[in-house]
Image: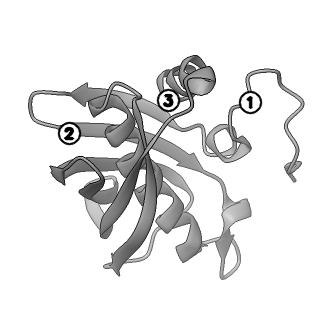
Amino acid sequence: MHSNQSNKSDNRPVYLDIFNAKVEKIDKADETLLMSFQVSSDFCHTGGRVLQGGFVATMLDCSMAFLAFELTDYEKSPMTIDMNINYLSSGAPGKYLAKAKVIKIGKSIGFLSSELFQDDKLVASASCSAKMADINKKYLKQMKETVRK
């Protein structure tokens, strides 16, 4: 199993590595982001066959946050205020794609949504509102490297 401590010097959150999270495509003009995840049976229940819902939520939240980081040029950190998730079908171990898009980003609040797919099956959708907090400039480079890695 995986350690909850990262001994890497880049401070990348461990869950990004555990799920092999990657930003596949960012379209700033359309305000969309495509992000992939690879999930093992370690994060599934029912004999390792059904992905646990909290990990579905993590992937959806992560894709919306990474999109907000990119669109604000890392000037703002989206702090999720609320998130509504619709679980539409079960997921299994394997590859997932999250498609995030902006509903609206204002000066202090952002509204985003994301859909999570496994193959062509829509597993879940989410929408959130997020406080767009200023990022401490000393963390700016680290944030960019985390998202773009």
Label located before the other in sequence (3 or 1)? 1
Please identify the quadrant where the C terminus is shown.
top right
On screen, 126 above or below 4?
A: below
Residue depicted at 46% across the width and 68% down the height: 91
Residue depicted at 34% across the width and 30% down the height: 70
Q: Amino acid at mark 1?
A: Asn
Quadrant of residue 40 in the image? bottom right
Q: Amino acid at mark 3?
A: Val
Q: Which residue is mark 1?
A: 11
Residue depicted at 27% across the width and 65% down the height: 122
In the foreground, 44 or 26: 26
Quadrant of residue 30 in the image? top left
Where residue 141 appears, as percent x and y from the top left, is 56, 17
Q: Which residue is mark 3?
A: 147
On screen, 85 above or below 106?
A: below
Label located before the other in sequence (3 or 2)? 2
Regarding mark 1 in the picture, which secondary structure is present there? loop
Q: Residues within 10 Å of mark 2 (few under 14, many from 20)?
A: many
Label located before the other in sequence (2 or 1)? 1
Is residue 51 in view from this perspective?
A: no
Where residue 28 appears, as percent x and y from the top left, is 18, 27
Q: Residues within 10 Å of mark 3 (few under 14, many from 20)?
A: many
Alpha carbon separation for disc pair 3 and 1:
12 Å
Alpha carbon separation for disc pair 3 and 2:
14 Å
Residue depicted at 50% across the width and 22% down the height: 144
In the foreground, 61 or 92: 61
Q: Which residue is mark 2?
A: 32
Of tags 2 and 1, the one toward the viewer is 1
Is residue 91 in view from this perspective?
A: yes
In the foreground, 82 or 98: 82
Regarding mark 2 in the picture, which secondary structure is present there? strand
Q: Amino acid at mark 2?
A: Thr
